[in-house]
Image (cartoon, rainbow, N blue to C red):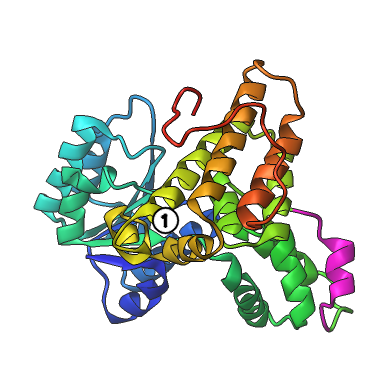
Amino acid sequence: MRIKSERLQCHLQQRLEGFYLVHGDDILLLQEACEAVRKKACVEGFTDREIFHVEGRFDWNQVIASDQAVSLFASRKLIELRLTSSKIGEAGSKTLQQLIRHNNQDNILLICSSKLDASAQRTKWYKVIDQAGICVSVSPLESTAMTGWIKQRAKTMHLNITDDAANMLAVRTEGNLLATQQELNKFTLFPDCETIGIEQVYDQVGSHACYNSFQLIDAALSGEAHRSLDILYRLRQESVEPLALIWVFAREIRLLERLLQNPQGIAVGLHQERVWNKRKQFFNYAASQHTVQSCIKLLSLCQWIDKVQKGIEIDNIWDRLIDLTLGLAVSDWPLSAPTEPFSINDNACL
């Protein structure tokens, strides 16, 4: 059975299954979900624990041996597998299927992994765990939910934090909940600080925000110009390759252009293009602001930036990326005109 991490505590209050797969990209939420399973297992008498780090030429026979061995310290045991990749090979797949078929009720199997994509969720071993146990998906916290999460987390830590301070902490640690938690932990060391205000966050918290190119695109599609630039500047500081950003921009702008040209309307186009539900609002907003012609201009700028990156043209590539970001976020932003017109069917560079 598949559940979201938010429902895990409720599930564990009701029962404990024999097999758990917890996967996701947010380190803090992933750790906390696994820890919740460990605590429940310990309460239920699974007090022994054996950890395997699955990497390189991992010997899966040792997992089978652990499952069959009788513990010297406890009658029941938690076997924890930490995957460095979803590609565990034929031996790994057969081993997991064997463990589940054998179903040693004196053991619980907990598998921890980074986010498993759609192809990984179609593998035999994933499907077997899905049928016999619980697959917990840990989703990153949306930026709009960060402030509320911070206030709730501060409350559980017996900290008082103002709304403005929570907002600033959210901005400075967006996309990096582990850093958010660490900053809150720091404030517990200041006993004289009865209430965390914006001044304390300003003085004590540096920028720990962690972004990716898809967050940049979503912010631009949503018309969040200031946030888009903040993310772009952060990506530049992290030495993200401009070519990677151009590729994502061009792909999403082409998608927006197809949605605008769909004769059955945006809603049908979103369904046909299989756009994720949480991203539909971004494209709906962008479609209300842009036209096919504005998309062509943006793609023309993408092509120009691509030529600059490859040394065909001379220009400041990051200045043009700022233009591109603002051009997508603000429909009437004056774009820097490339030297050549762009055809919507031109795939020479992009």
Exactly how many numbered labels are in the figure?
1
Query: What amino acid is labelled 1 in the image?
Result: Leu
Is residue 202 within the magenta segment? yes
Give the magenta part as a residue range.
195-207
Q: Nearer the viewer, residue 25 or 327?
A: 327
Q: Nearer the viewer, residue 207 or 271?
A: 271
| Rendered position, 92 above or below 272 | above
Q: Residue at x 49, y 58 (%)?
A: 31
Q: Nearer the viewer, residue 320 or 129?
A: 320
Picture coordinates of residue 30 (x, y %)?
Answer: 47, 58
Q: Residue at x 32, y 29 (%)?
A: 58
Query: As drawn, is 296 to the left or to the right of 326?
Result: left
Question: Hey, which residue is sitting farthest left in the picture?
Answer: 101
Picture coordinates of residue 338 (x, y %)?
Answer: 66, 31
Q: Disc 1 designates what residue?
A: 260
Query: As drawn, is 338 to the left or to the right of 316?
Result: left
Q: Residue at x 58, y 37 (%)?
A: 245
Query: As drawn, is 263 to the left or to the right of 320?
Result: left
Q: Based on the displayed image, in which of its 4 quarters is residue 240 positioned?
A: top right
| Rendered position, 289 above or below 119 | below
Q: Nearer the viewer, residue 236 or 201?
A: 236
Q: Quadrant of the N terminus?
A: bottom left
Picture coordinates of residue 197 (x, y %)?
Answer: 84, 78
Taking the image as drawn, is residue 114 in sight? no
Is residue 344 within the magenta segment? no
Q: Residues within 10 Å of mark 1 (few under 14, many from 20)?
A: many
Kind of element beneath mark 1: helix
